[in-house]
Structures are given as C-alpha cells and as structure tokens.
Image (cartoon, rainbow, N blue to C red):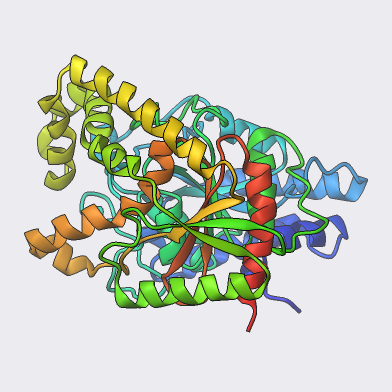
Amino acid sequence: MQDWLKMSAADLGRGIAAQEIDPVALTQRFLDAIDSHPHRDRIYSEVTRERALAEADAAAQRAQMGLRRSPLDGVPISWKDLFDSAGSATESGSDLLKGRVPEQDALVLETATAMGSVCLGKTHMSELAFSGLGLNPVKATPPCINDESAVPGGSSSGAAASVAFDLAAGAIGSDTGGSVRIPSAWNDLVGLKTTSGRISLEGVVPLCLKFDTIGPLVRSVEDAGLFLGLLEGTSGPDLRGDTSLKGRRFADLQTIAQEDLDPLVAQSYADALQKLRAAGAEIVPLEVPELAEAMALSAILFTTEAYGLWKEVIEANPEVMFNKILERFRSGANFSGADYVAAWGRLENCRMAWDQVTAGFDGVLSPSCPILPPNLNRLLQEEDYYVQANLLTLRNTRIGNLMGTCGLSLPTGTPSCGLQVLGQPDCEEALLRVGIGLEAALAAD
C-alpha cells in the first residue's frame, strides 16, 4: 500500500476519484501525523481538526455519488497564517495581531473550500511576511527538511515545512519578493509564483499590495497546475500533450542572478542546464542591464508601501516585534511620496525593457536562491551574517516580482538548490507546460 503522506496531491485526488482512498481516513492520517510530529508546533500555528474532518466527510459523500467538485476534492492542505479563516486565529506571524480571529474566510480559501479542498490548519511564517529567511523568534521558526539547524526560507516557512515533512499534501503561501519560491527551493519542492493581480487578495493580510501574490508549494508541476485551478475555482490548466523541451528556447540570465553563488548552488545550476540541453533545449546567455536599476529601487518600492500600510499598527506597539523586521519596516519612512511615485515610473521603464528582451524565450532561467539555508543560531547571534544572508536570499526571486512575471522554482536533485524559471505576465499555463518538461529533464539520470 502506498504511503498517503508522501503521495502527490494529484495522485491522492485520483485515488479518491477511484474510491481507493477515503477522504476521511486520509485526513485523519494527516491529522495523526501532525499531532505526533516532534516539530508540530514549529510548523503549524493552529490545526483546524473539526473543520478538516467535516470537509473530508462532505468530500467522501460527493465521491460516493460521483459529484466531486475538482481533481483535488477531498485532498488535505495547509494555509499560511495570513489567509483569513473564519473562527481561527490569523496573526500573520506577529504579536501585533495576537488574538485576531476573522469572521469569514479569505476569498481564495472560500474558493478552494468550495472546490472541495480540506483545510488542515494554518502554518507559521516570517513576521508580517517581511523576510525571505523564515526566521521568526516571536512565534516559531520551522525546520528545513535538509538541515534542521537551518532556517527553511520564508516567508511561507511553515507552508514549505508542512509539505516537506509529510504533514500536508500541499500548501498555500504568498510571494511578495520570493516567499513561495525560496522555501520551495530550500525544501526541495515546486513553488509557483502567480502574476500580481491574478488571484484575489481579499481577506489576505497584506504586506505590499502591488507585489503580493498567492501561490502553492507542492510536490510536482502537475500539482502546481491543479492548485492554481483550486485557487481560481477551475479544474486547472490542461498540461497534457507534448511537453518536450526540443525546440524550446531559454534565457540563462547573467545579470546579477549569478553573482556570489554558493559553490554547490553554482554546480547544481550548471548541472541543471546541462540536463536541459541534453533534453533538446536551446539555452542562450542573456544580459538585462536595466535589472540593476530595478533592483536598486527595491528599498523604496517595498519598504515604503509596507510601512505605509503598517505604520499605525507598528508604532502603537513596536516592542512586540522582532527587531530586524521592525527596522526593515521603519526604513520605509526614509522615502517621500515623490520618491515612491518616481520609483514606480522608473520600474515601469525597466519592465518594458525586460519584456522586449525576454519575449522570444520560453522562460528565463537562474538559480532560485544564491545561497544554501543559513544557520538559525548564527542568524540570531551574528549581525553581519544576518544582513548578508537576508540580502542574498531574496535577490534572485525578487527579479520576478519587480518585473511583474509569473515564476516557478523546481528541485534540481541537489538538496536545497532550486532552478527558477520566469515566464511572461499572466502566462501561468504556458509556464506550467514548460515546467512539466523541465521537471522531467531535471529528474533524468
């Protein structure tokens, strides 16, 4: 008998459809695994047992009657602690929101529930989602699957850990500067960053509304496609057919993205490109000089909006925050409204330049993250180590957010080393089809 905890969400859904898997038994299996796991309270902020079992029971009845609502009807998943969930605490990893219990679900959770998904509970995250490390001394720091003394990546840290440690079939996170792709890379998962504006943020605790996006952390590209459908209320894109890489053309991004790489990351990336070439892909080096200007705008664009959204709440109770996150928010006060508006104008010009030079490619490739997961204790104790790690962690993924693209992080086969592929805005379906081919090539011997 297959271990349900290790199966892909797609396979679990097929098992339910064939009436080989009972959604109630499946959900109970996950709940038991969560309760018995030594890192339960570092991964889940709250387990919604009653809700999960009620939703699983309804899914079981639909399956028996042949009335399943989606390919993932009856599949148990976790939700990052910034999605409002009726009657359950939603604190966005911060004591600033301690005791906050919404009266209704976020629209995206409501949609996924209507499609039959089973909510196992809420997962820990970086405070207010403003860090790519996954370090949260205020609430909890989940472990990394490949090194439990290291951070797991963030801000969707618990989301990644819930899947990597077999405590959810998939997880829903958010990505403002890399918060789906980084923890996916460091925990050997597939992470999908959707295009800004594609999935509603109604009922989602914000960080930067112009950059915040929602996406899944899962075991396969097929799962990513099904989860995209789940979040949008559809059956997901059709990823069948020819997914060969023959004739596919990819850009190997040279600008910024390959500077200061950890040697293991550099080697895993080189090995990955070789596998893609062996599968028939053409890979062309690409320089995008405008990226340097766009990256330099990050401090203005992200911190100004974040502090503008949170200033009153933060300054009413700043002592409850992790000081590094507090400092990052407050740095947004250094810029004026005129600075912010001008920065957006310059970013739009950079985006136009990016669109022009990348339009002829099936995707833009880079390492998902330049470094390996940093040591948790060193981050807390060494100022320089924290600053350097924090800067590098978000660097490559932030390119996708700044350029307004969709993006995938795929496991390369080297632990905690991901391959990032950026697609065109609002072209998730095309990106996922390419992703199927990339996934197969990377898995080849």
| Residue positioned 76% across, 46% down in the render | 59
Left or right, 393 with reference to 320: right
Between 177 and 67, the residue placed more toward the observer is 177
The answer to whether one can see residue 59 in this image is yes
The front one of 259 and 265 is 259
Quadrant containing the N terminus in the rendered view: bottom right
Res 442 seen here: no
Taking the view exactly as shown, the residue that stands out farthest to the bottom is 445
Q: Residue 81 at x, y = what percent? A: 41, 42
The answer to whether residue 402 is left or right of residue 356 is: left
Question: Does residue 185 appear to the left or right of 149 in the view shown?
Answer: right
Task: List x then y, in percent, for residue 93.
Answer: 31, 44
Left or right of 406? Residue 185 is left
Locate residue 115: give its quadrant.
top right
Q: Who's the residue at 84% across and 65% down the image?
A: 20
Q: Quadrant of residue 10?
A: bottom right
> Which residue occupies the foreground of this view, 37 or 79?
79
Image location of residue 47, percent across then percent down: 48, 51
Q: Which residue lies at the image location 31% right of the left edge and 26% below the top edge?
A: 346
- At horizontal 83% and vertical 56% (from top left) the residue drawn is 241
Residue 248 locus on image (x, y percent): 67, 58
- 278 w.r.t. 179: above or below: below
Q: How many marks?
A: 0
Give the position of the C terminus as an image quadrant.
bottom right
- Up the image or down, 217 lies above or below 90; here it is below
